Amino acid sequence: MNHTFETIYEKESDAIFRFCLVRVSSREQSLDITQETFLRLWQSLKKGEDIQNSRAFLFTIAHRLVIDWYRKKKSLSWDKIFSKDDKEIDVVDEKTTEINLSTSAEGRYLMDKINELSPSYRDPVYLRYGEDLSPPEIGEILGISTNAASVRINRGLEELRKKYLSR
Amino acid sequence: MKDNNLQNSIEEIKKIKMTALEKKRVFEYVVNSKISSSQESIRSPWFNYSFIARIKKTRLAYYVVVPLIIILASGGIAFASEDSLPNSILYPIKVSIVEPIRGALTFSPKAKAVYESNLATKRMVEAETLAGEGKLNQPIENRLNNLLERHTASLNNALNKVDKIESTTGSIGQSEDLITNFHANMNAHAQVLDILSGKKEYDQNGQYNDIQISKTARDNADLITNISKNDEIKTENKIQNKLDNYKRRKEAIQSLIDKTTTELDRASAKPSASSQEIIESTNQTLNRAKQFLYDANEHENKGDQAGAYSTLLDSESSVKEAGIFLQTGLKFGGKFKGKWND
């Protein structure tokens, strides 16, 4: 089991990290979510669960953890707004770009534009072109049909082109 | 993807990776984590002795336990529907499922006749209960009416079979007991229902018009009785057999009259505004029973054996009706809306 996990980890850890980073735009947070994602995989393997597609499994877990992270962050933001604390309010939303990337400006710009896409298009587009996942795999991860995934990919790409080329 | 700039940007994103240190740190954390072991549930020391554990060990038990649970749950619903009234959501279960099933499980014609007669009485009691609460509306009346017709038809079928058995075996009396009981119950409860519902209407001729269910009950009672009497006329042998039973039945009716009179006297000792009309009406019915008994004796003295026996049955029916009306009327006493003869 250790060997299986190690193999999967070597193959997928960067992709999961990258996926989280595009979404949360914070390296530390991305590392935390990546760690939690693989911890879930480790526990499932230890229980003897039969995981047919480890890639889809990991992206599904990561996707849900990112959503949970946003929910916690937003509720925390509202608490800060309504508190009498004099500290500076840090309103976090999905477009916060606290990016600490060792990548080119072009890459960072594209990530910004992906994050500006409609929520239903953002993940399908990234998973398709950023991680080379197939529409069936994307459908499985996001809990939608293969057809729906294909439609969102195409529409998302059109929208991304407009945004990217509008500069 | 045609745009080279967009493609290049995507390639840039794909270069994003964890550092070697970050990757090692995450890996070691996961494989050395103690969270996974602590999340295993601790089995109770009593697990091996628990019923659920035994079920889990034997898959075949599912084929026994699950049907058993379904049966018990169904029994619970059936039990809960037992006392339901026509305005309850469980009532359809009672009249469409529970009662027909029970009826199907009664095998002898006599048992079926008793069962259907009791069901007819039950419908009247349900009507009385709702009328006492002011909840007896037209749709419910219609429903109860239809059920009453159904029970009467089933009773008639069963009585025919009882009659045939009696003709074959030579034994008599069972069908007559059933008929007089049904007649008494229908008339007594119809009378109570009329008073409880407060619906008293008189036509142009001064004749009283009772409510629909009461009318159906009385009509059905007469129908069953008349069918039986018509059959008696056709069968001479049956009449001869009944004459042998005449004395026994006469003594039983006299005993019943005495008993009902005692109960009436007891109720009369502590009269109230509501019980007074019950006592008066019971007294009238009891007097009717006594008159029938006297008339039966007159027929017997004249040698009209068939007439004597028929009138004797009328007496029996009337005294039973008086007893049932007294008992039921006193139970609903506080809910009577007005006097009988206003």
Image (tube, grey):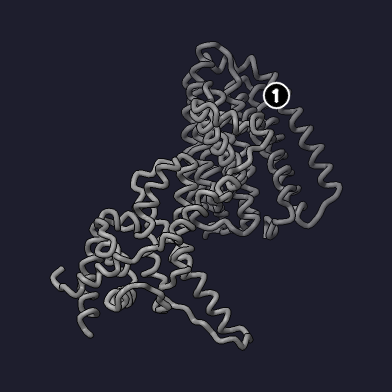
Farthest front residue?
A: B20
Pick the residue in front: A115 or A147.
A115
Q: Residue lying furthest left in this view?
A: B2
Residue extending furthest toward the top: B169
Residue at the image point whose x is 24% and y is 75% from the top: A160
Evaluate whether residue B78 shows in this view. Answer: yes
**At which x and y percent is residue A150?**
22, 61
Secondary element type, mark 1? helix
Please tell me whether residue B114 is drawn above or below residue B280 in the rendered image: above
Find residue A115 and report its horizontal and vertical position in percent. Answer: 34, 74
Tell me if B340 is positioned left or right of B222 in this view.
Answer: right
Nearest the viewer among B55 and B153 is B55
User: Image quarter for residue A62?
Assistant: bottom left
Image quarter where the N terminus of chain A lies is top left
Residue type indicated by callout 1: Lys
Residue, disc 1 = B250
Q: Decide if residue B156 is on the left or right side of residue B302.
A: left
Residue at x 82% of width, y 47% of height: B268
User: Does residue A77 lie above or below A17 as drawn?
Assistant: below
Q: Is residue B222 visible?
A: no
Q: Residue furthest right?
A: B269
Count of numbered circles in the view: 1
Q: Residues within 10 Å of mark 1 (few under 14, many from 20)?
A: some
Is residue A132 found left or right of A88 in the rendered image? left
Q: Position of residue A114 (x, y in %)?
A: 30, 73
**Subunit that carries the residue with mark 1:** B
Query: Residue at horizontal 20%, vertical 73%?
Result: B6
In the image shown, does B283 or B320 lie closer to the viewer? B320
Q: Quadrant of the C terminus of chain A?
A: bottom left
